[in-house]
């Protein structure tokens, strides 16, 4: 999937965060909803300006960023 068809940045909107084209919904906001347990159906119902493809683009962008990342620092030890 070409996420660039659905996501862009604009320095005048949300300080240049990646957003879904035609909205003020940022990629990090949508990922946050998913991490809180929202389903794709719930997101699409609450934000009808989104499409299944625009949500898929969020994952495509995230996957690309993680593929290009070369440093992962995780501390998995309990405090």
Image (cartoon, helix red, strand yellow):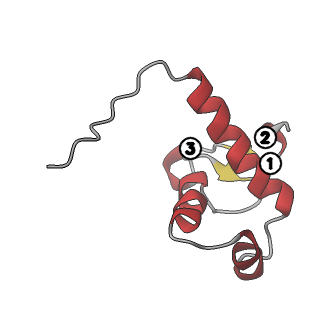
Between circles 1 and 3, the one closer to the viewer is: 1
Asked if marks 1 and 3 touch (Cβ < 8 Å), the reply is no
Question: Based on the displayed image, in which of its 4 quarters is residue 38 positioned?
Answer: bottom right
Q: Name the disc covering residue 54, or none.
A: none
Query: Could you say whether the residue bearing mark 3 is in a helix, strand or loop?
Result: loop
Residue picked out by circle 2: 3
Which residue is drawn at the image coordinates 65% and 52% (left, top)? Answer: 19
Q: Is residue 27 left or right of residue 36?
A: right
61 vs 78, nearest the viewer:
78
Whether label 2 touches label 1, CB < 8 Å = yes
Q: Which residue is mark 3?
A: 11
Who is closer to the viewer here, 78 or 53? 78
Q: Measuring from the top left, give residue 75's x and y in whole percent.
A: 27, 37
Q: Residues within 10 Å of mark 2 (few under 14, many from 20)?
A: some
Q: Is residue 18 above or below residue 20?
A: above
- Secondary element under disc 1, as helix, strand or loop, is loop
Ranked by sequence position, the earlier of labels 3 and 2 is: 2
What residue is pinned by disc 1? 6
């Amino acid at each position: 999937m070409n996420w660039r068809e659905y996501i862009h940045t604009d320095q005048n909107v949300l300080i240049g965060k990646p957003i879904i084209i035609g909205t003020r919904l940022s990629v990090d906001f949508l990922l946050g909803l998913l991490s809180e347990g929202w389903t794709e159906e719930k997101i699409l119902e609450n934000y009808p300006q989104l499409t299944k493809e625009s949500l898929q683009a969020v994952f495509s962008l995230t996957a690309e960023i993680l593929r290009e990342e070369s440093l992962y620092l995780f501390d998995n030890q309990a405090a």
